[in-house]
Image (spheres, rainbow, N blue to C red):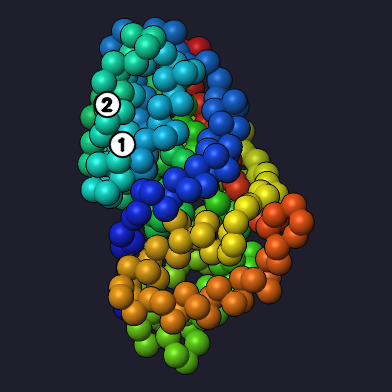
Amino acid sequence: MSPTAPVWDPHQYLRHSGHRARAFVDLLAHVPELPAETPAGRPRIADLGCGPGNVTRLLADRWPDAHITGLDNSPEMLAEAAPLTGPTPGGGHLDFAPADVTTWAPTEPYELIVSNATLQWVPGHVTRFPVWVEGLAPGGVLAFQVPGNFDSPSHRLMRELAQSARWKDRLGETLRHDDAVRTPAAYLHDLAGLGCEVDAWETTYTHVLQGEDAVLDWVKGTGLRPVLTALGDDAEPFVTEYRAALREAYPATAHGTLFPFRRVFVVARKPGQR
């Protein structure tokens, strides 16, 4: 059985939007100034895996005159993002379009290609780096962050349950984690080999989540989506078992539920104009 393409729920995803957006803000803080001279007369930016567009619009704060396009393969996410389409206050433009990150290639020069917590869903995404770097304007930047928490209890317990006798026949290889992301050093090697100047690092956030079964509520918007999609109306027994395991792994405290979350960041600049 091949991994199940998840059906996304934008509203569930956005329930923890503040915590999720923090990594994107930190990524953008490390993106250098984009080339001053651009073929289009203003920066051209692509956001790969834009989701509901809540962080895509943050790009317009940093580059107010840019033409920014959010790309995603989820109709549900693009429908949520659609109302954000239009001119931006700084004279730029924001739009969204369907695209599959596994095959997307630039058809015009981009000053910035950015991706927020998407590439872990793309098997072999490093093979796309040459195409994306080629599509950057001289001095352009490829920047992304991906979760690096696949060995944490939230994901390990999910995998163990999916492979248990009760569920393995239905879930099989639904969850793919071992090769989902690389280390900062490996990404640096990949992109430096393409001639880029690379900054790669990792950060572990300790999110303080509120509410009952807060970690379960978080993963229902992201990592658990393939399981929920594969099981459909039969998902509740799995969720019940998983909930019990998460409660033990992430006990609630007087301050909330502490949820350590490691992320990997990469900013790669193509040689050329600065």
**Residue 81: mark in rendering:** 1
The kind of secondary structure element at disc 1 is: helix
Please give left or right for residue 26 compared with residue 236 in the image: right
| Residue at the spot of label 2 | 85
Mark 1: few/some/many CA within 10 Å (<14, 14-19, 20+): many
Q: Name which residue type carries label 2.
A: Thr
Nearest the camera: 74 or 250?
A: 250
Please give the name of the residue rendered at 23% of the width and 29% of the height, measured from the top-left corner.
107
Please give the name of the residue rendered at 47% of the width and 92% of the height, measured from the top-left corner.
165
| Cβ atoms at labels 1 and 2 below 8 Å apart | yes
Q: Is residue 50 above or below residue 255?
A: above
Q: Position of residue 159 (x, y in %)?
A: 52, 75
Q: Position of residue 45 (x, y in %)?
A: 36, 25
Q: Name which residue type carries label 1.
A: Ala
Mark 2: few/some/many CA within 10 Å (<14, 14-19, 20+): some
Q: Quadrant of residue 50?
A: top left
